[in-house]
Image: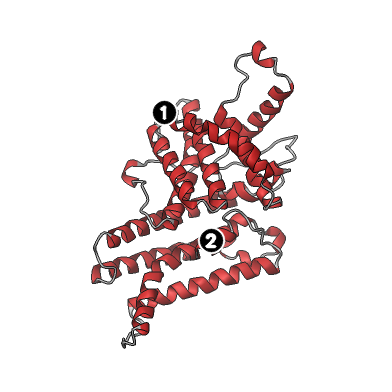
């Protein structure tokens, strides 16, 4: 049940786990529990601590959708997870980074945002240390498959790191000059006997469009974080050069939303049954990110008004336009959430609905 909830509600917007690989791991997990003597017969039949803890985290995150206030399962397995953290930190691995992404998501869902940020930054450091941020050129199939797995994890890790860095008011630690990752390709799963926790079937081509556009959006916001950091280090946000840069970022956000394909752009005209949560999440993220760009200029105007000073701004003045954009995006967030309520789509997900609104 909890695995089903995870793949139905969380996986599509936090895609760091390969479904086919998870099926193999999950079946082996139960096989080893039922037949402990298999380890003595075949020494290759084992799961690492990060793999086992990833299963526990999937259960915990899935349960938070069903029984949000019941922490009994979390308390039981979280103590096991915490004992493996030292191993994960000292021995970087693909499974350990996947676990760290989910653990960070869990911490954020329990309002431990500082801890969530620390865990995700540790995962970024580990990903770079094992070369997850680089494409390995080779004609060998095994290496090509590893590249695909790495790129999916890296893109998801990058998105979560950018979002949490913004929440904590910090600059992203990721340097794109050190990253060379191709976007992963998603293929339709074709199982004859599909596991029961494969509830939500998606069109791989449509999801590919979402994933690519989501990554592109996070790259724009990564640029915003660098811009904000330079301002915090001494350069006033209200200088001509800073306003010019903010206007440039505004243009990039507009180009991004205008460049969305119809399947992602016009989702609110669809019947509720044909709308996936990742499509709604994309729009929520866009407006949330855009608010951050216009907010400083809105605060400037409000401070001037409170001081009883007078200021005259034309409607076309960049400061006024950027300030209004923050208000417009806030209204759009309300409209989207209201749409979700009316269409019975609001699911109180870990950061799909609640946490974007909370931080906004």
Position of 83 with respect to 63 (left or right) is left
Q: Residue at x 61, y 64 (%)?
A: 267
Along the line of sight, which residue is nearer the eye, 314 or 39? Answer: 39
Q: Residue at x 60, y 48 (%)?
A: 12
In terms of image quadrants, where is residue 256? Answer: bottom left
Residue behind mark 1: 138
Residue 18 higher or lower than 214, as above or below: above
- Which of pointers 1 and 2 lies earlier in the amino acid sequence? 1
State which quarter of the image contains the N terminus: top right
Picture coordinates of residue 289, whole percent (x, y): 45, 62
Residue 267 higher or lower than 180, as above or below: below
What distance separates the C-alpha of mark 1 from that of mark 2?
Answer: 40 Å
**For the residue labelled by badge 1, is the local secondary structure a helix, a strand or a loop?**
loop
Q: Residue furthest top?
A: 41
Picture coordinates of residue 275, whole percent (x, y): 66, 59
Picture coordinates of residue 5, whole percent (x, y): 69, 47
Picture coordinates of residue 186, whole percent (x, y): 56, 43
Position of 56 with respect to 258 (left or right) is right
Dot 2, crowdedness within 10 Å: few (<14), some or many (≥20)?
some
Dot 1, crowdedness within 10 Å: few (<14), some or many (≥20)?
few
Q: Nearer the viewer, mark 1 or mark 2?
A: 2
Residue 16 higher or lower than 67, as above or below: above
In this rendering, does residue 358 appear at all? yes
Residue behind mark 2: 356
**For the residue labelled by badge 2, is the local secondary structure a helix, a strand or a loop?**
helix
Q: Residue at x 47, y 44 (%)?
A: 157
In this rendering, does residue 198 appear at all? no
Along the line of sight, which residue is nearer the eye, 1 or 187? Answer: 1
Along the line of sight, which residue is nearer the eye, 40 or 78? Answer: 78
């Amino acid at each position: 049940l909890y695995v089903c909830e995870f793949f139905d509600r969380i996986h599509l917007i936090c895609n760091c786990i390969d479904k086919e690989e998870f099926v193999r791991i999950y079946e082996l997990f139960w096989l080893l529990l039922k037949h402990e003597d298999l380890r003595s017969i075949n020494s290759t039949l084992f799961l690492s601590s990060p793999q086992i803890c990833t299963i526990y985290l999937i259960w915990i995150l899935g349960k938070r959708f069903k029984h949000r206030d019941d922490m009994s399962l979390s308390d039981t397995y979280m103590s096991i997870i915490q004992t493996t953290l030292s191993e994960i930190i000292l021995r970087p691995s693909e499974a350990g980074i996947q676990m760290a992404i989910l653990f960070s998501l869990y911490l954020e869902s329990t309002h431990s945002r500082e801890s969530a940020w620390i865990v995700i930054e540790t995962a970024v450091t580990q990903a770079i240390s094992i070369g997850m941020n680089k494409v390995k050129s080779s004609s060998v199939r095994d290496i090509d498959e590893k590249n695909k797995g790495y790129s999916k994890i890296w893109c998801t890790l990058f998105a979560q790191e950018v979002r949490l860095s913004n929440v904590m008011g910090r600059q992203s630690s990721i340097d794109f000059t050190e990253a060379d990752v191709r976007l992963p390709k998603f293929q339709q799963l074709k199982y004859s006997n599909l596991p029961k926790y494969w509830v939500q079937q998606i069109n791989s081509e449509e999801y590919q469009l979402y994933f690519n556009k989501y990554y592109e959006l996070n790259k724009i916001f990564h640029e915003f974080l660098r811009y904000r950091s330079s301002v915090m280090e001494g350069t006033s946000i209200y200088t001509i050069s800073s306003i010019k840069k903010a206007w440039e970022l505004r243009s990039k956000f507009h180009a991004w939303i205008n460049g969305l394909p119809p399947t992602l752009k016009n989702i609110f005209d669809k019947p509720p049954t044909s709308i996936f949560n990742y499509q709604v999440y994309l729009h929520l993220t866009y407006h949330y990110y855009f608010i951050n760009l216009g907010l400083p200029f809105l605060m400037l105007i409000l401070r001037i008004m409170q001081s009883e000073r007078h200021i005259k701004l034309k409607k076309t003045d960049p400061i006024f336009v950027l300030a209004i954009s923050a208000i417009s995006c806030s209204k759009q967030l309300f409209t989207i959430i209201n749409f979700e309520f009316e269409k019975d789509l609001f699911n109180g997900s870990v950061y799909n609905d609640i946490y974007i609104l909370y931080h906004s």
